[in-house]
Image: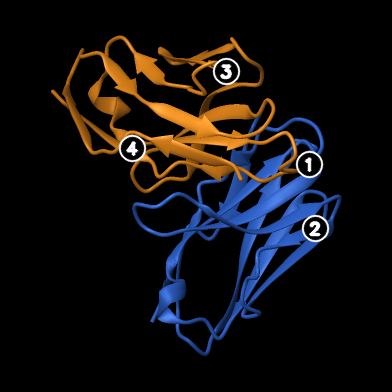
Amino acid sequence: DTEVTQTPKHLVMGMTNKKSLKCEQHMGHRAMYWYKQKAKKPPELMFVYSYEKLSINESVPSRFSPECPNSSLLNLHLHALQPEDSALYLCASSQNPLAGPTQYFGPGTRLLVL
Amino acid sequence: GNSVTQMEGPVTLSEEAFLTINCTYTATGYPSLFWYVQYPGEGLQLLLKATKADDKGSNKGFEATYRKETTSFHLEKGSVQVSDSAVYFCALRGETSGSRLTFGEGTQLTVNP
């Protein structure tokens, strides 16, 4: 089983709203990732969690706040987003950052900011 | 730094045609190489991978061989189907990149019946 699940599938929010994206995996992976993907472009790395600790933040604006409550769950809290933040947000996981290089992606949350 | 160059799309083929999508890379040492596929409206799915030189990854009729001498990982399929229509991303994970993936720009494939 190489499944990463994400909820919700679609999200529409205003610029003053607060919402959260959720990601879950039950493969025992200890590295989890958030990516942002704009149309017709490859995914861009936002955050990496390694053993539930934030290890990489790619200079993402503070209106995006990641959280890793346990080894299976990853959240992305959204607040005061801008229309240009509209994109597909992908979660991924891998065995761990130092071994098992393969990342497995979820289906994504398509976010529209009005 | 690491980089991946894919052939530009879009690529349009008829059903049962032969497919090649070129991918070349720049990296030090021996990176791991991947092909991911993204169907319309979906996330990325791992299609195949190769972690050392001369390895051949294969899945669902697709193949790619890790060629260190030409720094390439071209994707091939002998007979494409309409259901193969998607965007294909070549990616690498460098030996010293930690967990970072470097993606190519993606190649849109459309297969017509």
Q: Amino acid at mark 4?
A: Thr
Helix, strand or loop status at disc 1: loop
- Chain under callout 4: B
Contact between labelled residues 1 and 2, with CB atoms less than 8 Å apart: yes
Question: Which residue, given by chain and number where applicable, does mark 1 sit on?
Answer: A97
Question: Which residue, given by chain and number where applicable, does mark 4 sit on?
Answer: B107
Return the disc, 2 or 1, that comes first in the chain's sequence. Answer: 2
Question: Which residue, given by chain and number where applicable, does mark 2 sit on?
Answer: A55
Q: Position of residue A40 (x, y in %)?
A: 34, 52
Contact between labelled residues 2 and 4, with CB atoms less than 8 Å apart: no
* Residue in view at x 13 percent, y 23 percent: B113
In the image, the chain rendered in blue is A
Q: Amino acid at mark 1?
A: Pro
Q: Position of residue B16 (x, y in %)?
A: 21, 12
Q: Residues within 10 Å of mark 2 (few under 14, many from 20)?
A: some
Q: Amino acid at mark 2?
A: Ser
